[in-house]
Structure formats: C-alpha cells, structure tokens
Image (cartoon, helix red, strand yellow):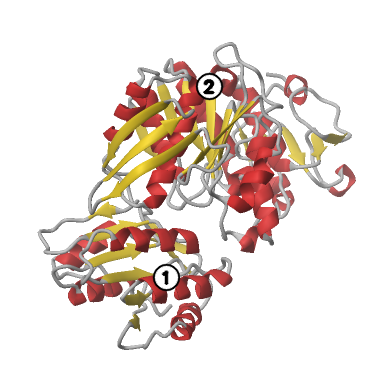
Amino acid sequence: MRLSELLVYVPNILNIGAVNADPEVVAPVVEDSRMVEPGGIFVARSGLSVDGHTYIAAAVDRGAVAVFGECLPVDVDCRVPYIQVVDGGLALAYLAAAQAGFPARNLVMIGVTGTDGKTTTSNLIFSILKSAGIKSGMISTVSAVLGDEEMDTGLHVTTPTSPDVQAYLSRMVKAGLTHCVLEATSHGLAQHRVAACDFDVAVVTNIQHEHLDFHGTWEHYRDAKAMLFRNLMAGTRKAQFTDKLAVINLDDAPSADYLRAIPADRHLCYAITGRPGAQVFARKIHYGASSTRLVVSIDGCQSLVIESALVGEFNVSNMLAAVAVARGLGISTGAIKAGIEAIKGVPGRMERIDEGQEFPAIVDFAHTPNALQRALEAARLMIPPTGRVIVVFGCAGLRDPEKRVMMGHIAAHLADLTVITAEDPRTESLDVIMAATAAACIEKGGIEGETFWRVPDRGEAILKAVQMAQVGDVVISCGKGHEQSMCFGTVEYPWDDRRAMRAALRGEPLRTLPTASQ
C-alpha cells in the first residue's frame, strides 16, 4: 500500500511534515526501531519506558519510509514523511490493522476484560464455541490458539502488542475461523493494543483493586476497562452477527451500574446471587474438593445442570459469564454444558500438582487482593475442617504498593500458615516489599516464626511450605501461575512455579536465579 492509502485509516492526524512523498509501504509497521525493515513504518511514542522519538534517525537509517510520532514536526529531524498524531499507540493499531486488511471485520469478536478471571472465562467461552461446532480462535495472556496451532503470547501477563494482535487475527481469517475470543487487559485497552478490533461482545468479570501504579486511581482503572464497552457501538456491524452485546457481572456492585449505563444493543447480566435484572444466575451450588455442581437458570425459564472440574465461587462466576455470552450468541444449552464440562483446568489457575504426596498442592495466578482471597477460600473447600491452608505468595515491585498491605491482611485472615517470598521484585528492594507484607500480617494477629515466615528465595519458600504440610492440609503457591519468568532488576530470569512445586514435593528445591536477595 502507498502511504497515502494508509493515512485514510489513521485517526487524529494533526500534521504532516515537510517531506512531500508518497512511498510504497512494503514492510510491517513497528514501534521498536530495532525491528524496522526496509520499506516499513516506524511509530514513535512518548511516555513509555523510553521516548521513541529519540530513535527516529535510527529507524530511518534501517529503512523506514515514513514515521508517525506525537511531537511537532519542527522538533523532529526526519528525512522521510513525518506524520504527527495525537496518540501513537492508536495510530500503531490502525496502521497494523490496515496492513492486515482489518481481519476483525471478518470475525465475531468477543472481548473479555476484568481484574480476575479473564483467562479462565476466555477459555470457557472458547470451549463452548468449539462444542457448538463454531470455528474459533483465542488470544489470551497465556497463549494464542489459531485453529489447530497454539503458541505462547509472552513471558508476563498482558495483551500482546497491536501488530501482534492483528497478525493473529489475520491468521485466523486465513485459517477459515469465524469467531475470536480476545482477553483484554487494562494496559492493553489504555494503550490501544486492541483498538481496530471491532468487538461485537464485551464481557467483564470484575473490577477490583489492581494496577493503580499505572492508572493512578480505581476510577481511572475502571475507565480503562470500560473502553471495551464504549468502543462496542463504534465498531463495524457484521453480517454474521449484527448486535453489539454487553455482558456484565451484577455481583460486582461498584462497576455494574457504571457499565450498564454505556450504550449497547443488548445488555446481558449474570450473578451468582440471582440479583434482580440478572438473566443468568446460579442456584443449588455444591462446592466439592475437586469439582463444582450447580444449576444455571437462563431467563428464568431454562435450567442447566453443570458438573465442572473448576472449584471455588469465583469459578462459578466465570462460568456464568461464559453462559451469558453463549446465550447472547444463540448457542444451545447442550453445547454450553458440554463446553464448560470439557474444561478440566486452565494452566496456572488452581492447577493441581501431583507427585504422589498426601495433600493437595496448588499453583494459582492469584496476584491481586481479590484473587488471593478467592483462591484461599477455594483452598479451604479442599480440606477437612481440621486441615490447614498453607500459602506462599509475594508482591511485585514497581506495582501498586497498597496491595502489599491488603494481601498481607488477607493471608493472615484466611490462611493458617503463610510464607512471604519474591514475586518479580524488579528494581525495588525485595526486603522492603516483604517487610510491608509482614507488617500487615502482624496487624492482623500474625506471629513471625509461628504463623508466617519470610523466605526471599521463592523455590526455598515453596519447599518450606511443602515441608510443613501434613495429611489434611493444602499448599497453594499464588502469584505466578503459568508465567515462565521472574524479574530481578531489569532482567527476566526463567521461572515456573509448577516446576518449583514439583521439585519441592520431591524434596529438591528449584532455586530462584539470581539469589533472591538481589
């Protein structure tokens, strides 16, 4: 495509620089100057860890034929056409979508957002679609499923970049898929990584305390999540699914009314409690140690009995969200039941680790206060009343410090024994992070050395928890889940909580690299 053809799709252009040319664009648009290919476009963005405008000359040297940026053209030394835009991230998304032929317009797009439960809910929806015989793909923070192909989407949890998202969608269209489930994080929404995705269904699980280091306030965080719903009506209407559907959790009181006020063709609401206005709700719930049985009511006239391998109240909520989406898509109750019951587990989400030990050992991604509370409540259901919940967790560096206190309070209240350890300390002092959580445990009656311990090395911490466990107890390691790395300083080191738990159960601790005191 010529540059002039691409400009038609880019929103909020402010200025075009002095260089008068219309080059042919034959390589992808990128935001990393090191990834520029001859004939490609470079998008310079401000406000990230580095200022992309300082790399414009390097991008041009590598063969960029045009540059999009947020600074005034007079402030930029650029030898190729320079286009000033309001938001580089938004320009990047639309340029990538245009280069890919706007693949989302050929798919029924289902976006799933929320603080906790996004990945499980996405997997449940995807499984229901497959059970209904619908050719579907999925992009989650764990993996991208493109028909028969599956690939990792990154070491840490966030929505992939907009060029990556558009590339995945393009491959889905080429593979003949008709539907896509896309997990949308608050960062992914705020940074426009899922812009130009033309969503047809917006789903929220819950909006809890998280990522305030990035968003500043809970209200700003909620607004980032709400972008998925605000963008619904602006998206292309498609022949295969013309409605714009909003699926909302009425149990999440602080955000439910706010999201319901955002226009959509249809609002479908779900709730565990059967609140007024919920079209999908649960009753006769039986929580077992390794399964959950419930009856789902749909529109007050259909009842669906589900036996799920997923445990805990939070997973009931995730199932209801998936049922509501399926109802909105017109999927049969038989396919809904089969799809949910086909999910035996999601990587790193209440995942059982079995090395022949006499007690349950669990790895879960719970890294927020709400998720930790729900995980510990679910763990309690797995053991007899005399059993103990032994939890291992940490709090990440360069993230909202309020979580350290909140999660310390929750662990002291809901766990019998707690081991505080590392979870991506980054450039912060691990000792300082652990001290804040330890102080919170003490505030709630915890006694260091009796009910909680500080063990900086995560592998050693998991081993300590395992060594304390007896028949009737449960050990749960929270915070890392499926992730494959842990960040110390600015370096991502290989790490897998599941491998660490298996090693600990064999009495062979998998030690953190580098030494946890760094």
Q: Secondary structure at mark 2?
A: strand
Please tell me how many numbered marks the rendered image carries: 2
Residue 44 image point, x, y percent: 71, 45
Position of the N terminus, as image quadrant, is top right
Please give the name of the residue rendered at 31% of the width and 88% of the height, measured from the top-left corner.
449
The residue most toward the top is 239
Q: Is residue 417 above or below residue 257?
A: below
How far apart in space, not on screen, are marks 2 and 1 (Cα)? 39 Å
Q: Which mark is residue 394?
A: 1
- Tell me which residue sits at (79%, 45%) in the image: 70
Residue 296: name its quadrant: top left
- Look at label 2 and name its amino acid: Val
The C terminus - image quarter: bottom left
Left or right: where 125 falls relative to 457: right
| In-front residue for pair 301/134 | 301
Quarter of image, res 453: bottom left
- The kind of residue tagged 1 is Gly
Rendered location of residue 14, percent (x, y): 87, 36
**Helix, strand or loop status at disc 1:** loop
Q: Which residue is mark 2?
A: 108
- Residue 401 vertical placement versus 216 (above, below): below
Residue at figure coordinates x 37%, y 88% from the top left = 447
For the question of whether residue 147 can be seen, the reply is: no
Front-lying residue, 202 or 477: 202
- How many other residues sit within 10 Å of disc 1, few (<14), some (14-19) or many (≥20)? many
First in sequence, mark 2 or 1: give its number. 2
Q: Which mark is residue 50?
A: none
Residue 473, compared with residue 287, is above or below; it is below
